Amino acid sequence: MKRFTLLSLTLIFTSCASLFNNPYQEIQLKTNVPTRVVVLEDSLSTSTKVHSFTVKRSEEHLAISIASDSLSRKIDIRPFNSFAYASNFFNPSLWTLGFWLIDRNSPKRYGYPTLVSVDLNNPLQEYMDYDAFKPTKQLLKVTPLKLLALHNASLELAYERTTGDDFSTQLMISWLLPSSLSNYDIDPSPQTKGFRLALEERFYFKKKAPFGPYFALELDYLDRQSYTKREFAPNQEGIDPFDYYEGSYEDTFIVNAIYLSRNFKFGYQKEFSSVFLDVYIGLGVRTRNISHSERINPEDVLLSYQDFDLEYNRIKEGKSIDMSIPLNARIGWRF
């Protein structure tokens, strides 16, 4: 009981940033030529292209002086609110409000970029919060959450290639898995087959491609076949798919689906050590074309006994248009 009380008091009188953030942070600074660096009046005498040093978290700008044999530069690295501090707002409540009240005056709420690049030959550019001197022409990415998707679970690979300072092109291909979480243990097994292709053109509007925020236009094509079981009624004049009919029967058949989506996306791509994280959300229009095969009688009518039947809308034959909302995160590596 005493331990529980102590833990509770610790959580009440401390917060996320105060608990999880170290008061000191390591920063790596890279330059395009060998340099000597002075950080907060502390001189690092070694002349090299890569400098590592530890600083105390603060809301103040971090002043750094950089000098080579012929060039010099002074920069002020701006602090930002750390993830631990921002997490107080992910689940608003009286509890997290207390965390926020404590964190807002704590220097541990702040952080500096862990990696900073400075090009002394470019006087118009102060600093870059990524490795600007390591070539990043190509990225290979995977989408782990796709393996556990509710619908259209798949093994997905994406290849991104920069085509300029601000632009890149990405090609994605995925192979559908036999079942997804929404139909993992149903009878009959869906035995899903198919593939997905997507072509995406990106514009990075704040940093050099492929870093930072971007807008993208994407064309996405999905071809899928899967088994399902539904009730049908003999086709007759005036039949309503949402009514009950004597003589209805169950049939197991294949649903052939082709989707074509046109999406506008916003995303952010950031490098952590040697791993890239690409997070995005979008909005678009999707054209759906559905057909059936291996039916007992292709002329009979598919029935639905529910007022809100999403599966019925997904598998009924014909063409339709609906909204597409792509949302996911990818992990990538440069090569």
Image (spheres, rainbow, N blue to C red):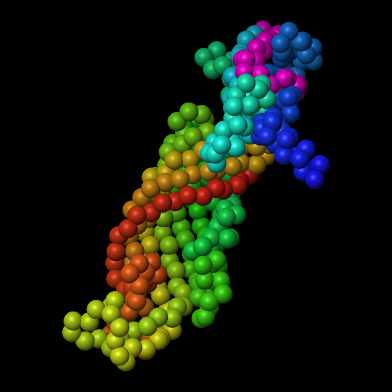
The image quarter in which residue 12 lies? top right
As displayed, is residue 312 above or below residue 83?
below
As displayed, is residue 190 above or below residue 53?
below
Magenta extent: 50-70
Q: Position of residue 37 (x, y in %)?
A: 72, 13
Q: Position of residue 52 (x, y in %)?
A: 75, 23
As displayed, is residue 326 above or below residue 35?
below
Q: Is residue 273 visible?
A: yes
Considering depth in this image, is 36 or 177 the residue closer to the camera?
A: 177
Seen in the image, is 264 located left or right of residue 43? left
Q: Residue at x 76, y 40 (%)?
A: 5
Q: Position of residue 204 (x, y in %)?
A: 47, 34
As displayed, is residue 206 above or below residue 275?
above
- Magenta part, dominant SS: strand
Identify the residue at the far right of this view.
Answer: 2
Q: Position of residue 36 (x, y in %)?
A: 73, 13
Seen in the image, is 305 located left or right of residue 73? left
Considering depth in this image, is 127 or 323 the residue closer to the camera?
A: 323
Q: Residue at x 71, y 33 (%)?
A: 19
Seen in the image, is 311 located left or right of residue 53? left
Residue 59 lies in magenta, yes or no? yes
The image quarter in which residue 315 lies? bottom left
Q: Is residue 175 visible?
A: no
Residue 316 lies in magenta, yes or no? no
Considering depth in this image, is 165 or 281 the residue closer to the camera?
A: 281
